[in-house]
Amino acid sequence: MNRELNWAVLGSGWIAGDMADAFLDEGRKVYSVGSRTKEKVIEFAKKHNIDKVYDDYHEMFYDDNVDAVYIATPHNKHFEAIMEALENGKHVLCEKPAASNAWEWSAMVRAAERNGVGVLEAMRPVFHPGF
């Protein structure tokens, strides 16, 4: 099977907006978006040409059409969101830091392995050639 993944974005801040714009720049679309604030997520969806909005962002983790979730929430919410996504069979790309400690990261890796999905932290180290 060779198809594009349906991505959901969790968060409606500027970093989430940059990711949604990156999809558009590549000729692709974000499938859906969720946030804590209904008004903000509706405005975000209009600005970034996203059709599906979740009134309750937890719904994205149970949507069978979502393959992967990009998480751009406040840092203290990362672990909970990542685990919910992984336990529901969603691939995850999370803004840094994805975990607060080694225990959290280990739990995420185990959940990803158990559910046959991947988990990545979105970071670009200063020694990367493209920095």
Image: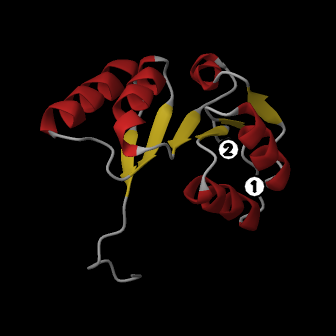
Quarter of the rendering containing residue 8: top right
Quarter of the rendering containing residue 3: top right
Q: Looking at the picture, how far across and down is residue 105, in whole percent?
A: 23, 36
Mark 1 closeness class: few <14, some 14–19, many ≥20 residues within 10 Å: few
Q: Is residue 31 visible?
A: no
Q: Identify the residue position indicated by label 1 in the image.
A: 28
Q: Looking at the picture, how far across and down is residue 93, in whole percent?
A: 46, 45
Dot placed on the residue nearer the N-terminal end, 1 or 2: 2
Q: Looking at the picture, how far across and down is residue 52, in whole percent?
A: 80, 33
Classify the position of the N terminus by image quarter.
Answer: top right
Residue at 60% x, 16% y is 62
Q: Identify the residue position indicated by label 2 in the image.
A: 4
Residue at 23% x, 41% y is 100
Secondary structure found at label 1: loop
Residue at 27% x, 41% y is 99
Classify the position of the C terminus by image quarter.
Answer: bottom left
Q: Is residue 110 left or right of residue 131?
A: left
Query: Gap in Å between the C-alphas at discs 1 and 2?
Result: 9 Å
Q: Is residue 109 visible?
A: yes
**Amino acid at dot 1:** Arg
Secondary structure found at label 2: loop
**Amino acid at dot 2:** Glu
Q: Is residue 49 left or right of residue 120?
A: right
Residue at 60% x, 32% y is 67
